[in-house]
Image: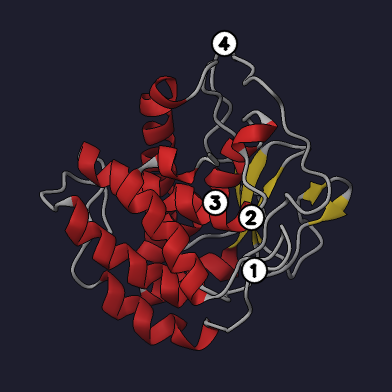
């Protein structure tokens, strides 16, 4: 997946990203919405956006991974900043992007006073920031750069949930974040911001098939099994953000 103009249709993109999400199911990617995710009823405007990325100084990210992370952050943020007023009231305020950390060290960001977990990607509601373990991103990126875009779009979805009225947030938090990720990635491709490459699914098939499991969604913090995540992602890919909002 690359950040350039796309000539693909929505139907073709849906077929690609649905398989990506099927492979991602069960990967163990978590988020900071578990337990203490207080949501605001109206987004709070800010005079200028917070820093886009600010990795802890001890973390070194491979150049190709860092470039794709920057592109993914820019593409997802651009989609929400462009389309927010079409979808919701209030002003769009992006989350802070802390970026990469190394969960094997002591210099780990905290969320609600607790250090972030190793090999994880999170949205932290108290700090209103996104962060991801460098090993998680690097290992996934070796299987294909689409991994980075999917992880960031999913966690950004949690940041969006934290900005909405509670009646717009689904009980199935993780599946709604998958839905929002589908809406954003396909929407960004339609906007011409990113392009799905033909090799994305092949790259992820080799690396992520073993990570799929059969655990269904039963609680708000569960991610759901592969079929549930595919349906959620496709709902966003086909219906856009509005298809992710409860009736």
Q: Earlier in the sequence, mark 1 or mark 3?
A: 3
**Residue beneath disc 4:** 47
Question: In 3D space, how far apart are the residues under numbered discs 3 and 2 (Cα atoms)?
Answer: 9 Å
Q: Do callouts 4 and 2 mark residues in contact (Cβ within 8 Å)?
A: no
Q: Name the residue nearer the viewer: 151 or 102.
A: 151
**Above or below for 99 versus 92:** below
Q: Earlier in the sequence, mark 4 or mark 1?
A: 4
Q: Do callouts 4 and 1 mark residues in contact (Cβ within 8 Å)?
A: no
Residue 192 percent across, percent down from the top left: 20, 40
Q: Nearer the viewer, mark 3 or mark 2?
A: 2
Q: Do callouts 1 and 3 mark residues in contact (Cβ within 8 Å)?
A: no
Q: Which of marks 4 and 2 is nearer the N terminus?
A: 4
Q: Do callouts 1 and 2 mark residues in contact (Cβ within 8 Å)?
A: yes
Q: Judging from the image, what secondary structure is the residue with disc 4 in?
A: loop
Residue 179 percent across, percent down from the top left: 47, 52
| Residue 177: numbered disc | 3
Residue 73 percent across, percent down from the top left: 44, 43
**Residue beneath disc 1:** 217
Is 78 positioned to the left or the right of 33 in the image?
Answer: left
Q: Judging from the image, what secondary structure is the residue with disc 1 in?
A: loop
Q: Nearer the viewer, mark 3 or mark 4?
A: 3
**Residue beneath disc 2:** 172
**Residue beneath the point at 25% across and 41% down:** 193
> In this rendering, does residue 115 appear at all?
yes
């Amino acid at each position: 997946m690359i950040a350039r103009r796309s000539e693909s249709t929505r139907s073709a993109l849906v077929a690609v990203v649905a398989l990506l999400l099927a492979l991602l199911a069960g990967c163990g990617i978590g988020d900071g919405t578990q337990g203490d995710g207080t949501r605001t009823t109206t987004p709070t405007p800010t005079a200028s956006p917070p820093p886009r990325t600010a990795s802890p100084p001890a973390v070194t990210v491979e150049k190709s991974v860092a470039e794709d992370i920057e592109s993914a952050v820019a593409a997802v943020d651009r989609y929400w900043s462009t389309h927010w007023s079409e979808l919701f009231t209030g002003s769009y305020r992006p989350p802070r992007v802390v970026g990469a950390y190394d969960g094997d060290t002591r210099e780990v960001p905290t969320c609600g006073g607790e250090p972030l977990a190793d090999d994880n990607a999170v949205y932290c509601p108290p700090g209103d920031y996104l962060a991801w373990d460098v090993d998680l991103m690097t290992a996934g990126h070796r299987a294909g750069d689409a991994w980075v875009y999917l992880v960031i779009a999913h966690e950004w979805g949690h940041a969006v949930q934290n900005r909405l009225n509670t009646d717009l947030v689904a009980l199935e938090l993780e599946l709604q974040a998958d839905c929002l990720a589908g809406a954003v990635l396909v929407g960004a491709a339609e906007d011409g911001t990113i392009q799905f490459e033909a090799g994305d699914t092949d790259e992820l098939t080799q690396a992520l098939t073993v990570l799929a499991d059969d655990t269904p969604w039963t609680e708000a913090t569960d991610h759901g099994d592969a079929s549930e995540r595919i349906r959620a992602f496709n709902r966003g890919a086909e219906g856009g953000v509005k298809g992710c909002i409860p009736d």
